[in-house]
Amino acid sequence: MTQFAPDSLPQSAEAGGGVRSVKSAERTIAVLEHLSSAPKACSLRELATALGLPRASGYALLTTLVSTGWVEADGGGRYRLGIRALRAGMSYIERDDLVQRARPVMNDLNDELGETVHLARLDGVEIVYLATNISRHSLAVVTRPGRRLPCWATGLGKAILAGRPWAEVDELLPETLEPRTVHTLTDRVALRAELEEIRRRGHAVDEQESTLGLRCFAVSLDLGRVPNEALSCSIPLVRLDPEREEAVVAALLRARARIIR
């Protein structure tokens, strides 16, 4: 978590050819990012403690963000993201070339399989969901755009990591791989072997590693030197059999080819 000393700039202050970063701007970004990942609204004390903010300047910053619509106050001294943050996030997705290119393919894939389809991008050590087509079944996987999950615990993330040299992956990952479920691979040796197997067979499988009762099949979208995005289909185990799995993987590979073209 980003923290700030009261009377000094962050260590990253010198960047961009000697241009000093603006402390107030970094604090603003830190507050917005913390609120975006917090499971519930936060008090001033919680924000100040988590980010190392002086209470007085933290209150002034929150007051400004509330007045401009980026943060909302609930009247009880707690804060959450405001509607302007939603507008900024939707604008990012609506203007993303890959999302626009992938949407018709995802629609067709969703129609063909009847299951939930995801498009995601690697951001640091997390994958960020960019677009989702929900299953037509009553028992469905629902993941909103903007949701973040650790890359090592998802089929999407493993598909992306498998397209990179292990030395690069090892440097990217945190020292401790926290589990999402009891099935999450948290041992580096096991994860490396899994990534090698993904490269061999051409697709990744998340075997209840992110969500219990769910299997996710994913393929990377090789659009650059190394992949940074992936496409997946998530299906409850009760609707799967070997024949169905083969059909899902084949459909994902065809969809990938269409997007890359």
Image (cartoon, rainbow, N blue to C red):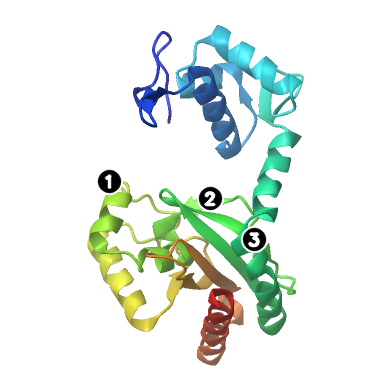
Contact (Cβ within 8 Å) of mark 3 with mark 1: no
The Cα atoms of the two marked residues, 2 and 3, are separated by 12 Å
Q: Where is residue 194 in the image (x, y as percent from the top left)?
A: 31, 71
Tell whether 238 sits left or right of 217.
Answer: right
Q: Which residue is drawn at 56% across and 10% down?
A: 57
Query: In the image, what residue occupies the spot 63% across and 58% down?
Result: 143
Q: In which quarter of the image is the N terminus?
A: top left
Look at label 2 and name its amino acid.
Arg
| Residue 140 seen in the current view | no
Q: Residue 175 carries which label?
A: 1
Residue at 25% in and 62% down: 166
State left or right for residue 50 relative to residue 198. Answer: right
Q: Is mark 2 on a helix, strand or loop?
A: strand
| Quadrant in the rendering for residue 186 | bottom left
In the displayed structure image, the side of residue 173 where residue 142 appears, left or right: right
Position of residue 81 measured from the top left corner of the image (x, y, whole percent): 67, 33
User: Which of the numbered marks, if any, corresponds to residue 131?
Assistant: 3
- Looking at the image, which residue sits at the far bottom? 243
Relative height, residue 234 to residue 169 (above, below): below
Q: How far apart are marks 3 and 1 (CA)?
A: 30 Å
- Marks 1,2: beta carbons within 8 A: no
Q: Quadrant of the C terminus?
A: bottom right
In what element is the residue under mark 1?
Answer: loop
Q: Tell me which numbered mark, 3 or 1, is placed earlier along the sequence.
A: 3
Residue at image x 59%, y 63%? 98
Q: What element carries label 3?
A: strand
Camera-side residue: 65 or 212? 65
The answer to whether 103 appears left or right of 2 in the picture is: right
| Residue behind mark 2 | 148
N-terminal of the pair, mark 2 or mark 3, is 3
